[in-house]
Image (cartoon, rainbow, N blue to C red):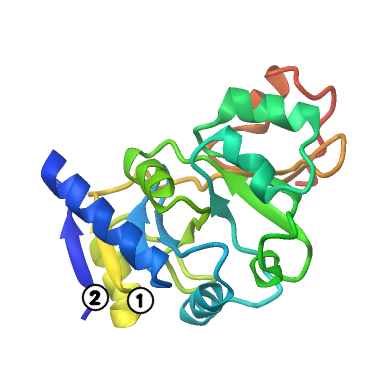
Amino acid sequence: MTRIVKIGSEGSFRKGLDEAARIISEGGIVSFPTESFYGLGVDATNPDAIGRLFRIKKRDPDLPILILISSLRKLPKCAASIPPRAKRMGEKFWPGGLTMVFQSSPTLPLVLTGGKGKVAIRISSHPLANALSRAVHVPITGTSANISRRPPCTMADQVVECLGDDLDLILDGGITQGKYPSTILDVTSDPPIVIREGIISVEEIARSGIYEEIINPV
Protein backbone atom coordinates (compact mmCIF):
# COMPACT_ATOMS: atom_id res chain seq x y z
CA MET A 1 0.00 0.00 0.00
CA THR A 2 1.32 3.44 -0.94
CA ARG A 3 2.46 5.43 2.09
CA ILE A 4 0.90 8.89 2.47
CA VAL A 5 2.50 11.64 4.55
CA LYS A 6 0.25 14.60 5.31
CA ILE A 7 2.20 17.85 5.38
CA GLY A 8 0.64 20.03 8.05
CA SER A 9 3.49 21.38 10.15
CA GLU A 10 7.20 22.21 9.98
CA GLY A 11 7.99 18.83 11.52
CA SER A 12 5.89 16.87 9.04
CA PHE A 13 7.32 18.97 6.19
CA ARG A 14 10.88 18.03 7.11
CA LYS A 15 10.05 14.40 7.85
CA GLY A 16 8.13 13.97 4.59
CA LEU A 17 10.82 15.75 2.62
CA ASP A 18 13.61 13.58 4.02
CA GLU A 19 11.67 10.38 3.31
CA ALA A 20 10.77 11.49 -0.21
CA ALA A 21 14.38 12.44 -1.01
CA ARG A 22 15.59 9.07 0.22
CA ILE A 23 13.03 7.16 -1.84
CA ILE A 24 13.83 9.09 -5.01
CA SER A 25 17.57 8.62 -4.46
CA GLU A 26 16.97 4.87 -4.15
CA GLY A 27 15.09 4.72 -7.46
CA GLY A 28 11.55 5.10 -6.14
CA ILE A 29 8.59 7.24 -7.20
CA VAL A 30 7.05 10.01 -5.11
CA SER A 31 3.97 12.14 -5.77
CA PHE A 32 4.00 15.73 -4.54
CA PRO A 33 2.05 18.96 -5.05
CA THR A 34 3.21 21.64 -7.49
CA GLU A 35 1.89 25.10 -8.36
CA SER A 36 -0.55 23.48 -10.79
CA PHE A 37 -1.26 19.78 -10.14
CA TYR A 38 0.28 16.87 -8.28
CA GLY A 39 3.44 15.60 -9.94
CA LEU A 40 5.47 12.41 -10.02
CA GLY A 41 9.11 12.62 -9.05
CA VAL A 42 11.91 10.19 -9.83
CA ASP A 43 15.64 10.66 -10.21
CA ALA A 44 15.90 12.16 -13.70
CA THR A 45 19.38 10.66 -14.12
CA ASN A 46 18.18 7.09 -13.41
CA PRO A 47 17.00 5.31 -16.60
CA ASP A 48 15.38 2.44 -14.66
CA ALA A 49 13.34 4.83 -12.50
CA ILE A 50 12.28 6.78 -15.59
CA GLY A 51 11.27 3.55 -17.32
CA ARG A 52 9.12 2.61 -14.33
CA LEU A 53 7.52 6.06 -14.46
CA PHE A 54 6.58 5.59 -18.12
CA ARG A 55 5.03 2.21 -17.32
CA ILE A 56 2.98 3.53 -14.39
CA LYS A 57 1.63 6.45 -16.42
CA LYS A 58 1.11 4.21 -19.47
CA ARG A 59 2.89 6.97 -21.32
CA ASP A 60 3.95 6.78 -24.96
CA PRO A 61 7.76 6.33 -24.95
CA ASP A 62 8.01 8.98 -27.68
CA LEU A 63 6.73 11.64 -25.27
CA PRO A 64 9.42 13.37 -23.17
CA ILE A 65 9.17 13.91 -19.42
CA LEU A 66 9.73 17.38 -17.95
CA ILE A 67 12.13 17.86 -15.06
CA LEU A 68 12.47 20.19 -12.08
CA ILE A 69 15.73 21.78 -11.00
CA SER A 70 16.39 23.68 -7.79
CA SER A 71 18.04 26.82 -9.17
CA LEU A 72 19.19 28.54 -12.34
CA ARG A 73 22.74 27.50 -11.44
CA LYS A 74 21.76 23.88 -12.07
CA LEU A 75 20.61 24.55 -15.64
CA PRO A 76 24.02 23.98 -17.34
CA LYS A 77 24.07 20.42 -15.96
CA CYS A 78 20.85 19.60 -17.80
CA ALA A 79 20.94 21.72 -20.94
CA ALA A 80 23.59 21.27 -23.64
CA SER A 81 23.32 24.95 -24.53
CA ILE A 82 21.57 27.92 -22.93
CA PRO A 83 20.61 30.75 -25.29
CA PRO A 84 21.19 34.15 -23.61
CA ARG A 85 17.54 35.13 -24.05
CA ALA A 86 16.42 31.87 -22.45
CA LYS A 87 18.64 32.58 -19.46
CA ARG A 88 16.95 35.97 -19.11
CA MET A 89 13.57 34.21 -19.25
CA GLY A 90 14.66 32.00 -16.39
CA GLU A 91 15.80 34.98 -14.38
CA LYS A 92 12.38 36.62 -14.84
CA PHE A 93 9.92 33.73 -14.64
CA TRP A 94 11.62 31.16 -12.38
CA PRO A 95 10.54 29.91 -9.92
CA GLY A 96 7.14 29.72 -11.54
CA GLY A 97 4.82 28.22 -14.09
CA LEU A 98 7.08 28.42 -17.15
CA THR A 99 8.69 25.28 -18.54
CA MET A 100 11.39 25.82 -21.17
CA VAL A 101 12.61 23.23 -23.68
CA PHE A 102 16.38 23.01 -24.25
CA GLN A 103 18.75 20.72 -26.09
CA SER A 104 19.38 17.99 -23.55
CA SER A 105 22.73 17.50 -21.87
CA PRO A 106 24.32 14.15 -22.81
CA THR A 107 24.42 13.37 -19.08
CA LEU A 108 20.63 12.91 -19.05
CA PRO A 109 19.17 9.55 -20.19
CA LEU A 110 17.80 9.51 -23.72
CA VAL A 111 14.61 7.85 -22.45
CA LEU A 112 13.82 11.05 -20.55
CA THR A 113 13.65 13.01 -23.81
CA GLY A 114 11.44 10.52 -25.64
CA GLY A 115 14.39 9.96 -27.96
CA LYS A 116 14.18 13.54 -29.24
CA GLY A 117 17.27 14.95 -27.55
CA LYS A 118 15.36 17.84 -25.97
CA VAL A 119 14.46 18.30 -22.32
CA ALA A 120 11.75 20.45 -20.71
CA ILE A 121 12.92 22.19 -17.52
CA ARG A 122 11.27 24.26 -14.79
CA ILE A 123 11.97 25.59 -11.31
CA SER A 124 8.80 25.11 -9.28
CA SER A 125 7.42 27.92 -7.15
CA HIS A 126 5.59 25.48 -4.87
CA PRO A 127 7.52 25.33 -1.56
CA LEU A 128 7.30 21.55 -1.25
CA ALA A 129 8.22 20.78 -4.87
CA ASN A 130 11.06 23.28 -4.75
CA ALA A 131 12.39 21.94 -1.44
CA LEU A 132 12.26 18.37 -2.80
CA SER A 133 14.25 19.31 -5.90
CA ARG A 134 16.88 20.84 -3.60
CA ALA A 135 16.94 17.91 -1.19
CA VAL A 136 17.58 15.23 -3.81
CA HIS A 137 20.67 16.98 -5.30
CA VAL A 138 19.82 15.78 -8.83
CA PRO A 139 17.08 16.91 -11.23
CA ILE A 140 13.77 15.17 -10.61
CA THR A 141 10.84 14.57 -12.91
CA GLY A 142 7.78 16.78 -12.54
CA THR A 143 5.31 15.11 -14.87
CA SER A 144 1.67 15.12 -13.75
CA ALA A 145 0.44 12.37 -11.43
CA ASN A 146 -2.05 10.64 -13.70
CA ILE A 147 -2.47 8.03 -16.38
CA SER A 148 -1.58 9.60 -19.71
CA ARG A 149 -4.48 11.40 -21.40
CA ARG A 150 -6.53 11.37 -18.19
CA PRO A 151 -7.19 14.50 -16.10
CA PRO A 152 -4.36 15.52 -13.74
CA CYS A 153 -4.87 15.38 -9.98
CA THR A 154 -5.28 18.31 -7.60
CA MET A 155 -5.60 16.25 -4.39
CA ALA A 156 -3.69 13.36 -2.86
CA ASP A 157 -6.87 11.25 -2.72
CA GLN A 158 -7.19 11.58 -6.49
CA VAL A 159 -3.60 10.40 -6.92
CA VAL A 160 -4.41 7.31 -4.86
CA GLU A 161 -7.55 6.66 -6.90
CA CYS A 162 -5.69 7.11 -10.19
CA LEU A 163 -2.42 5.31 -9.52
CA GLY A 164 -3.26 3.06 -6.58
CA ASP A 165 -0.32 1.23 -5.07
CA ASP A 166 2.09 1.91 -7.93
CA LEU A 167 3.80 4.72 -6.02
CA ASP A 168 6.19 4.52 -3.08
CA LEU A 169 5.10 7.72 -1.33
CA ILE A 170 2.59 10.54 -1.65
CA LEU A 171 3.26 13.88 0.03
CA ASP A 172 -0.20 15.23 0.80
CA GLY A 173 0.15 19.00 0.68
CA GLY A 174 -3.55 19.73 0.30
CA ILE A 175 -5.40 20.94 -2.78
CA THR A 176 -3.31 22.45 -5.55
CA GLN A 177 -4.32 25.38 -7.74
CA GLY A 178 -5.20 23.20 -10.71
CA LYS A 179 -6.97 24.78 -13.69
CA TYR A 180 -3.85 25.45 -15.78
CA PRO A 181 -0.63 23.46 -16.26
CA SER A 182 2.73 25.13 -16.75
CA THR A 183 3.34 26.98 -20.01
CA ILE A 184 5.85 25.18 -22.25
CA LEU A 185 8.15 27.27 -24.46
CA ASP A 186 10.67 25.71 -26.83
CA VAL A 187 13.73 27.98 -26.69
CA THR A 188 15.90 25.85 -28.95
CA SER A 189 14.86 28.21 -31.75
CA ASP A 190 14.70 32.00 -31.92
CA PRO A 191 11.94 33.10 -32.02
CA PRO A 192 10.80 30.48 -29.49
CA ILE A 193 7.74 28.31 -30.05
CA VAL A 194 4.84 27.96 -27.64
CA ILE A 195 4.19 24.25 -27.14
CA ARG A 196 1.48 24.76 -24.52
CA GLU A 197 -0.02 27.89 -23.01
CA GLY A 198 -0.83 27.58 -19.33
CA ILE A 199 -0.10 29.49 -16.13
CA ILE A 200 2.11 32.08 -17.85
CA SER A 201 0.22 33.68 -20.74
CA VAL A 202 1.81 34.31 -24.12
CA GLU A 203 0.96 37.98 -23.61
CA GLU A 204 2.94 38.07 -20.38
CA ILE A 205 5.95 36.50 -22.09
CA ALA A 206 5.66 39.03 -24.91
CA ARG A 207 5.41 41.94 -22.46
CA SER A 208 8.71 40.92 -20.91
CA GLY A 209 10.40 42.17 -24.09
CA ILE A 210 13.01 39.43 -23.92
CA TYR A 211 12.01 38.02 -27.31
CA GLU A 212 11.02 40.30 -30.18
CA GLU A 213 8.76 37.58 -31.58
CA ILE A 214 7.10 34.46 -30.19
CA ILE A 215 5.58 31.77 -32.38
CA ASN A 216 2.24 30.53 -31.08
CA PRO A 217 0.84 27.85 -33.44
CA VAL A 218 -2.55 27.74 -31.69
Q: Residue at x 50, y 34 (%)?
A: 96
Kindly identify which residue carries mark 2: 2
**Can I make out residue 2 in this image?**
yes
Dot 1 amino acid type: Leu
Q: Is residue 57 above or below residue 45?
A: below
Give left or right: position of 27 versus 85: left
Label 1 neighbour load within 10 Å: few <14, some 14-19, many 20+: some
The reply to whether callout 1 and callout 2 are in contact (CB within 8 Å) is yes
Quadrant location of the N terminus in the rendered image: bottom left
Label 1: state its secondary structure.
helix
Residue 211 location in percent, x, y? 80, 25
Q: Residue at x 64, y 66 (%)?
A: 112
Residue 202 location in percent, x, y? 67, 32
Frontmost of labels 1 and 2 is 2
* Label 1 or label 2, whichever comes before in sequence order: 2
**Can I make out residue 9 in this image?**
no
Label 2: state its secondary structure.
loop
Q: Quadrant of residue 94?
A: top right
Label 2 neighbour load within 10 Å: few <14, some 14-19, many 20+: some
Give left or right: position of 68 versus 204: left
Disc number at residue 163?
A: 1
Dot 2 amino acid type: Thr
Asked whether 17 or 67 is in front, the reply is 17
Q: Quadrant of residue 119?
A: bottom right
Number of numbered labels in the structure image: 2
Disc number at residue 140?
A: none
Q: CA distance from mark 1 to mark 2?
A: 10 Å
Residue 51 location in percent, x, y? 56, 78
